[in-house]
Amino acid sequence: MSRFGEKLRYLRLQRGLTMRELADALEFKSHGFIGDLESGRKYPSLDLAVKVADYFGVTVDQLARDDLNVEG
C-alpha cells in the first residue's frame, strides 16, 4: 500500500480539489492528514480506504495494491 498517497494525490488533482476541499468532503477537521497520506508519512485505515474509494469511484484494490493503477 505504499503507493496509496501517490494515488490519492492523483485522484484529488484529477478532480481539481485542494487538500482542504478533500478533507472537508471526507469530514476531516484539518487537511494536514491528507498531506500526511499523500506524502506517505501515514497510511489509511481500512474504513478510510473504503471511504476514499467510494468518493472517487474506484476500488479499494486500486488504491491499496501497488501493482494496480487508478488511471483509466
Image: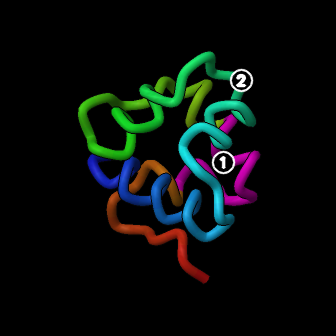
Residue at x 40% of width, y 55% of height: 65
Mark 2 element type:
loop
| Mark 1 residue crowding within 10 angstroms, few (<14) / some (14–19) / many (20+) | some
Q: Is residue 55 magenta?
A: yes
Q: Amino acid at mark 1?
A: Ala
Residue at x 58% of width, y 50% of height: 18
Residue 68, percent from left and from top: 43, 68
Residue 31 lies left or right of residue 2; in this view the side is right
Residue at x 34% of width, y 33% of height: 36
Residue 27 disc label: 2
Mark 1 element type:
helix
Q: Amino acid at mark 2?
A: Glu
Mark 1 vs mark 2: in front: 2
Residue 63, percent from left and from top: 50, 53
Residue 26, percent from left and from top: 69, 31
Q: Earlier in the sequence, mark 1 or mark 2?
A: 2
Q: Which residue is mark 1?
A: 53
Residue 36 lies left or right of residue 48; in this view the side is left
